[in-house]
Amino acid sequence: GDVYKRQQLQLQNNRLRLKRERPASYAEACETLETQRNRPLDEATYSVLIRNAVEAGDVDGGQRILERMTRNNVRRKRRAYAPLLAALSRHRRKDEVEALWAKMVKDGVKPDQMDLARLFAAAPSHDILRRMADDAARCGAFEIKMETAKALESGPWRARYERVDTET
């Protein structure tokens, strides 16, 4: 009881300190924390470090932290992927967005509507939409499969996707 509460309080203090101190490199801060503890960090701390790195403009550092999570067999949740997916999409790093999406799906992370929009923004094509629909269904995100199917077949969505397809 008390030991768990102390651990949770310590984790919360570490996260707040990292946000306040703004280290030069969040990837290095991650490594330092792991060394101090002599074990991997928890999923929430890794996710906060990724988000902070991306917000500080260090997308590559955020990706290195995600790689550390993977190497340390820490379960990845959507909150670890979302900031990276958003930043890579914003910078139109198409291949990296697609690779990150594939990793997210392989990890069994259920994408949401924003993830779908980010992938499409970076790599607009009907093939991408079809693949996203299949990936989403495999992860149990059936509402996204339906949304994607509607986008491919009807109304203003179809016009938008066709317009983007012909521009590229």
Image (spheres, rainbow, N blue to C red):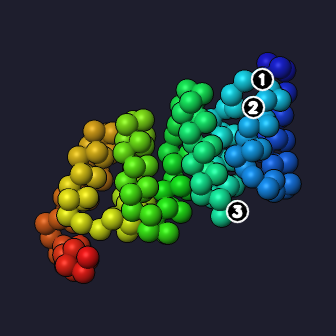
Residue type pointed to by label 1: Asn
Residue positioned 75% across, 52% down in the render:
25
The image quarter in which residue 54 lies: bottom right
Residue toward you, 87 or 10 = 87
The secondary structure type at the circle numbered 2 is helix
Q: Which mark is residue 38?
A: 1
Evaluate if marks 1 and 2 touch, with contact meaning CB atoms under 8 Å apart. Answer: yes
Q: CA distance from mark 1 to mark 2?
A: 6 Å
- The C terminus: image quadrant: bottom left
Residue positioned 42% across, 43% down in the render:
104
- The N terminus: image quadrant: top right
Lower sequence index among marks 3 and 2: 2
Residue positioned 50% across, 69% down in the render:
91
Q: Which mark is residue 56?
A: 3
The secondary structure type at the circle numbered 3 is loop
The residue that mark 2 highlights is 34
Residue 8 is at least partly visible in this image: no
Q: Position of residue 29 (x, y in %)?
A: 77, 44
